């Protein structure tokens, strides 16, 4: 199964760091983070089943923004041997009632209508695929992945399948069976991917890198990688937190540089700004040695700066192969390794 990934920090990456480091100045972003986080958890639930049952020839695209007349985002586009599936994933709580095109969330009418959204995505994708071949079948599904969520369909919905959390596995297995028994024409993944690529746009809601003024509302320093507390003890080799996490100091510094890099993505890492971000808890000499060891130098001399990876440490930690050990979590009678 092929997947494609974005190399810029996602909204979630960006807001996750603000949720930890941001002052009340970023209250809206922190709220948004909660809802994005719930959405991602829902998609992960669906992807778990897809990864478990997908034959190797399937292609899965996640969180794709496309522009074809209108712009739209598809949570998941799944290409099987003979069909295209566009899947919208919601991770709600409470009760959602659908009746004659209107949605009521916990009895209040809501303008956030997932059925309208999937219908629009379905029409857009069908129109796009028809340019390659009018015989490509595009199926639309909305999956409600929330554990404590109830969906009541008071009126039927044409051309859109509604799946709730207990039906995700059977939905995926049904796709596998459909393909095994189908006589439909084989679809050309490479041509479809080229088409999607030609219409792909950047996420229009991706936050811009923070300004100098906004960075003043960001808490500098090292926080615990486990509980996110800033109240950590920094020794020569370790960062120790009362929650039990012992992280190597080197790893904590690289992780912190990556945090800074996400909030300032697209800009090189400037030494004096990094020093300010560590707020005096790391010596200039030690910071330079870490930067030289793990980040590529762009300029030499008094304005030395480094390539900004622009992604959170947890996504790129494989690039820092010399960093040992990873996170060691001590309990009274146990030693376990986190994040592996
Ligand atoms: Zn901790």
Image (cartoon, rainbow, N blue to C red):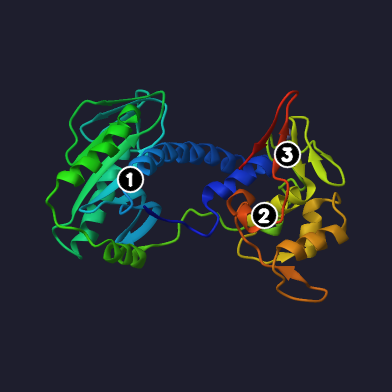
The residue at 79%/36% (across/down) is 231
User: Vertical placement of 239 versus 298: above or below?
Assistant: above
User: Vertical placement of 195 versus 100: above or below?
Assistant: below
Q: Quadrant of the C terminus?
A: top right
Cβ of mark 3 under 8 A from ligand 1: yes
| Residues tagged 1 and 3 counted as in contact (Cβ below 8 A) | no
Q: Work out whether mark 2 precedes mark 1 in sequence or the reverse, and give the earlier one.
A: 1
| Residues tagged 2 and 1 counted as in contact (Cβ below 8 A) | no
Element type where label 3 sits in the image: loop
Q: Nearer the viewer, residue 77 or 205?
A: 77
- Identify the image quadrant of residue 225: top right
Alpha carbons under labels 1 and 3: distance apart:
37 Å
Cβ of mark 2 under 8 A from ligand 1: no
Does residue 210 appear anywhere in the picture? no
For label 1, the residue is: 54
Mark 2 crowdedness (10 Å alpha carbons): few <14, some 14-19, many ≥20: many
On the picture, is 86 further left or further right than 324?
Answer: left
Q: Position of residue 295 (x, y in %)?
A: 70, 64
User: Vertical placement of 144 versus 53: above or below?
Assistant: above
On the picture, is 222 further left or further right than 158?
Answer: right
Q: Position of residue 255 (x, y in %)?
A: 69, 50
- Identify the image quadrant of residue 146: top left
Mark 1 or mark 3, whichever is nearer to me: 1
| Residues tagged 2 and 3 counted as in contact (Cβ below 8 A) | no
Element type where label 2 sits in the image: helix
Alpha carbons under labels 2 and 1: distance apart:
34 Å
Quadrant of the displayed image that contains ligand 1: top right
Q: Work out whether mark 1 precedes mark 3 in sequence or the reverse, and give the earlier one.
A: 1
Label ID, residue 224: 3
For label 2, the residue is: 258
Alpha carbons under labels 2 and 3: distance apart:
14 Å
Q: Position of residue 152 (x, y in %)?
A: 27, 25
């Amino acid at each position: 199964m092929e997947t494609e990934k974005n190399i810029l920090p996602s909204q979630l990456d960006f807001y996750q760091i603000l949720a930890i480091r941001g002052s009340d100045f970023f209250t809206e972003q922190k709220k948004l983070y909660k809802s994005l986080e719930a959405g991602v958890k829902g998609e992960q639930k669906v992807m778990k089943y897809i990864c478990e049952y997908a034959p190797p020839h399937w292609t899965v695209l996640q969180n794709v923004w496309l522009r074809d007349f209108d712009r739209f985002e598809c949570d998941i586009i799944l290409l099987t041997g003979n069909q295209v599936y566009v899947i919208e994933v919601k991770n709600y709580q409470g009760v959602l009632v659908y009746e004659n095109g209107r949605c009521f969330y916990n009895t209040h009418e809501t303008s956030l209508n997932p059925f309208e959204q999937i219908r629009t995505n379905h029409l857009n994708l069908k129109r796009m695929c028809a340019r390659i071949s009018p015989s490509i079948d595009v199926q639309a599904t909305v999956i409600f992945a929330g554990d404590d969520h109830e969906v009541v369909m008071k009126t039927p919905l044409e051309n859109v399948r509604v799946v709730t959390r207990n039906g995700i596995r059977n939905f995926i297995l049904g796709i596998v069976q459909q393909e095994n028994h189908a006589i439909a024409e084989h679809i050309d993944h490479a041509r479809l991917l080229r088409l999607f690529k030609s219409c792909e746009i950047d996420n229009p809601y991706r936050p811009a890198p923070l300004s100098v003024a906004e960075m003043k509302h960001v808490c500098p320093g090292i926080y615990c990688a486990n509980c996110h507390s800033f109240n950590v003890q920094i020794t020569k080799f370790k960062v120790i937190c009362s929650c039990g996490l012992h992280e190597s100091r080197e790893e904590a510094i690289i992780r912190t540089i990556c945090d800074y890099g996400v909030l300032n993505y697209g800009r090189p890492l400037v030494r004096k700004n990094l020093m300010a971000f560590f707020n005096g808890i790391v010596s200039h000499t030690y910071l330079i040695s870490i930067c030289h060891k793990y980040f590529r130098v762009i300029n030499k001399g008094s304005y030395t700066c480094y390539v900004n990876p622009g992604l959170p440490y947890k996504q790129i930690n494989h690039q820092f192969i010399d960093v040992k050990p990873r996170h060691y979590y001590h309990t009274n009678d146990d030693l376990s390794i986190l994040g592996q």
